[in-house]
Amino acid sequence: MLTGTSKLVRWLSPPCCLICKEVHGGQRAICLLCEMKLPQNTLSCRQCGLPLSTKIRRPSTQGPPSERCHACYRHPPHFSQTLAPFLMQTGMRELIQLWKFRGQSQLTPLLAALFESAAPFEYTRSLPESAVLVPVPTQWRRQIRRGFDHTWLLAEALRWQLPDKYEVKPWLQNTRYQTPQHQLNRRTRIQRGADRFVVHRGVAGRHIILIDDVMTTGSTARSAAAACVKGGAESISVWCLARTPPEDKTTDALR
């Protein structure tokens, strides 16, 4: 609820939408119209979150087409499910760039709220008691340069969106300093993704929910999940804000 002072400030300096740059009367940093236009990842591989179409869905010999993509059938990742409610396209891409690369950490609660409102209810409300949110960390030098740990902030914000306050644990350590992911092509990202993480022994017997901002090739998530499996995790899921469509060749903010 806005106080009298807040109302006066908003009247003197009405908010401007971060996406369309138009003045609006809402309480969020983006207007309602832009929020409604955010690209939804509505039909996707249930395992890796890759956007699917009826043409590329793997046919099933029994019943309707499968909900998994070709890549997950050929080389299944160690995580069983990816929840990525948005596509890394116009609107969401601008928000993530402002948040991650331009130091606007105050956008974290907005991004978490957008995730929660777009994610299927049954996925975020049916977690096992052993569930724990584990941010996928960037290398510490990059965190210092950025000024904040964006995946940790996102995990904490998502925690408060859930009815049960699950723990957030720093159980992954990124041990390899390398060229930022968004400066690498797809093949190089995949090749360099292996053995990047060291995992804490606390993952043993727990349901691990890996928290990240964007999934592109999935190499980061695969490497993090492989480390969790070695540590004895019972099961692994991935939550991220957005998934990059396979035809999208942009390299901004990709993991």
Image (cartoon, rainbow, N blue to C red):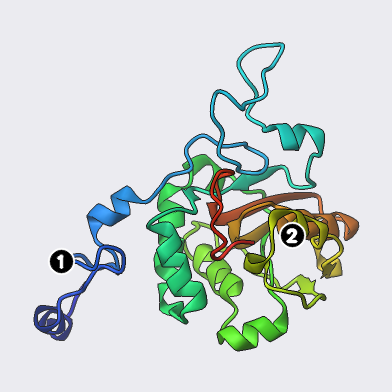
Residue situated furthest top in the rendering: 62
Is 47 above or below relative to 66? below
Q: Residues within 10 Å of mark 1 (few under 14, many from 20)?
A: some
- 163 vs 166, left or right, is left
- 205 vs 236, left or right, is right
Q: Name the residue: 69% across, 59% down.
A: 185
Kind of residue sitting beneath label 2: Arg
Q: Secondary structure at mark 1?
A: loop
Q: Is residue 206 visible in the rendered structure shown here?
A: no
Quarter residue 14 falls in: bottom left
Q: Is residue 8 visible in the rendered structure shown here?
A: yes
Disc assigned to residue 143: none
Q: Position of residue 45 (x, y in %)?
A: 62, 36
Q: Secondary structure at mark 2?
A: helix
Q: Name the residue: 41% across, 66% down.
A: 95
Q: Position of residue 146 (x, y in %)?
A: 57, 83
Q: Name the residue: 62% across, 66% down.
A: 182
**Nearer the camera: disc 2 or disc 1:** 2
Which quadrant of the rendered structure holds the N terminus? bottom left
Q: Earlier in the sequence, mark 2 or mark 1?
A: 1
Kind of residue sitting beneath label 1: Gly
- 204 vs 135, left or right, is right
Q: Which residue is mark 2?
A: 189
Disc assigned to residue 25: 1
Which quadrant of the rendered structure holds the C terminus? bottom right
